[in-house]
Every structure is written in C-alpha cells, then in structure tokens.
Amino acid sequence: MRVTNVERTRWGNYHDRTNSFDDTDDINAFIRIVKRNESLKEYIRSYVGKGNLQFVPHHFGKYSVDITLLRDGTPVADFDVERWSQWKDTWPEYYRHIHFLGRKEKFLQEERPFFMVYLNFPRNECLIVEKETIQQYPTITKTFKMKKVSDRVKEIPLSEGRRYK
C-alpha cells in the first residue's frame, strides 16, 4: 500500500503542532542550532560564502522549501526541514538509512545549494544531507515494514549525513 495524504498528515501531526503543516517551531529550532554551532555555520558557509546572511522561512511560499538563506536579499541556499518522531534523545538502532522523499525531488532542481535537514523529536539535534549527495542515489519504491506502507524515496547511507547539536 502506498503512503496516502491522510497518513502523511497523521504522521506529521505532533501534539505540539497546530496541524501537520505547522513547521514554524521546527524551522526556528534549526536556525537556533545553526546560530550556536560554529562547525555547522562553517559547513553552510563552505557552500555559500560569507556575507550578510539571513534565514527566511517560506520565502517562496508554503509549498516550497522551508527556509531560504539570503545574502543581501538574494537567495543563495535552500533548506527543507523534517522532524523524526522516533529519533528522541538517542539515535534509533534500526535507522540505518536517510530517506529523502521522492515528492521533494523538485527541491533538487534549483541551481543554488539545497540541504535536507532532519531534526530529532526534541529539536536539539539535526542531521543534514546536501543536494550533491542526495542526487547520487536513485529513487526507489521502498516498503517500510514498521508502518506497512511503501513510498518513493532515495535511500542514502546514514554515514552520508552530518549530525550537529
């Protein structure tokens, strides 16, 4: 069985959200992590350079990337943020891959850098994968045994991601 919109809504509708699309706190949490983590700032700067940088949530509208990084008003990078309910204080043993959802492939089409950000449930740690790495992997139909559904994903080895607190 394929993942339905009803399931996507239910899985993304946490107790601390207004609805499954309410990612404001997730976006703000990621921005806070960046601001306090010099290593993460340097990683991002290695793609966009230095300058007057500003994170802008939903710069291109609510159905596009979650965050756009602007330099002097010009978009220089995009970020999409997901929150993993199973990743709490410790990494789940059965998480061996990063699954980039096929429906997000449109975000890989822009010329500027793109980063997929996965937050843990408490929103104090993140895992990041950049566009070039994501693009190396084919999109497959993956059956998720725990949820008994399938979806189109790029299955990326966990070692390809970078974790930051």
Image (tube, rainbow, N blue to C red):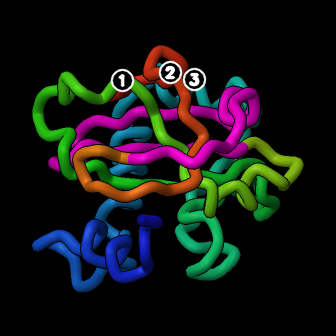
Number of residues whose C-alpha sits closer than 10 Å to that of mark 1, classed few (under 14), some (14–19) or many (20 or more): few
First along the sequence among labels 1 and 2: 1
First along the sequence among labels 3 and 1: 3
Is 108 located above or below residue 93 in the figure?
below
Q: Residue at x 64, y 72 (%)?
A: 64
Name the secondary structure under disc 1: loop
- Quarter of the view holding residue 11: bottom left
**Mark 1 → mark 2, Cα distance in angstroms:** 7 Å
Q: Which three-letter amino acid code belongs to the residue tagged 2?
A: Pro
Q: Residue at x 46, y 34 (%)?
A: 98
Per the image, the residue denoted by label 2 is: 157
Image position, residue 153 (x, y; %): 57, 47
Per the image, the residue denoted by label 3 is: 42
Image position, residue 116 (x, y; %): 55, 44
The circle on residue 20 is: none
Q: Which residues are magenta?
A: 114-143
**Mark 2 → mark 3, Cα distance in angstroms:** 23 Å
Q: Residue at x 67, y 43 (%)?
A: 139
Residue 120 highlighted magenta (yes or no): yes
Q: Are marks 2 and 3 in contact (CB under 8 Å)?
A: no
Q: Are marks 1 and 2 in contact (CB under 8 Å)?
A: yes
